[in-house]
């Protein structure tokens, strides 16, 4: 019983560190490696690292690998993205494939 409770508490702690956010792309600064997104009424700035994964999701939900260069082509205020963050660092970016 103790092992079960300990494992559940560890699981809850680990899931609280990383969370997904649906956001609207605002701008990407490649020199500073910063991504600005709009979440609700608020603009937030996140850091991008070399370990950040970028993927493109098609209408069937299949993901393919992408590059950070895709962010330079994204339209400000119109491109919806999903980001997984660890505090203020982006670990993964998912973009929907354009029609």
Image (cartoon, helix red, strand yellow):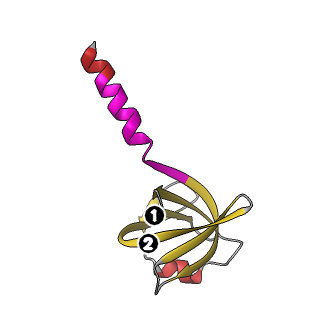
Tell me which residue sits at (70%, 62%) in the image: 42
Contact between labelled residues 1 and 2, with CB atoms less than 8 Å apart:
yes
Q: What are the residue bounds of the magenta stretch? A: 6-20
Q: Is residue 58 above or below residue 69?
A: above
Classify mark 1: helix, strand or loop.
strand
Which quadrant would the C terminus be assigned to in this image?
A: bottom right
Question: Which residue is under mark 1?
Answer: 90
Magenta span dominant secondary structure: helix
How far separated are the C-alphas under marks 2 and 1? 6 Å
In terms of image quadrants, where is residue 75? Answer: bottom right
Tell me which residue sits at (49%, 64%) in the image: 93
Name the N-terminal-most of marks 2 and 1: 2
Residue reaching furthest bottom?
31
Q: Position of residue 69 (x, y in %)?
A: 47, 82
Q: Position of residue 45 (x, y in %)?
A: 56, 69
How many numbered marks have been drawn onto this rendered protein structure? 2
In terms of image quadrants, where is residue 41? Answer: bottom right
Question: Which residue is under mark 2?
Answer: 48
Return the residue nearer the eye: 47 or 72: 47
Q: Is residue 32 above or below residue 6?
A: below
Classify mark 2: helix, strand or loop.
strand
**Residue 96 is covered by the magenta coloring:** no
Q: Position of residue 29 (x, y in %)?
A: 53, 83
Tell me which residue sits at (54%, 61%) in the image: 58
* Dot 1 crowding, Cα within 10 Å, few <14, some 14–19, many 20+: many
């Amino acid at each position: 019983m103790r092992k079960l409770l300990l494992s559940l508490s560890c699981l809850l702690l680990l899931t609280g560190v990383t969370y997904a956010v649906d956001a609207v792309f605002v701008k990407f600064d490649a020199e500073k490696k910063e991504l600005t997104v709009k979440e609700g009424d608020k603009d937030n700035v996140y850091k991008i690292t070399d370990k950040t994964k970028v993927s493109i999701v098609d209408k069937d939900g299949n993901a393919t690998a992408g590059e950070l260069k895709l962010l330079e082509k994204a339209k400000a205020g119109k491109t919806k993205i999903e980001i997984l963050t660890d505090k203020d660092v982006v670990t993964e970016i998912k973009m929907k494939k354009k029609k």
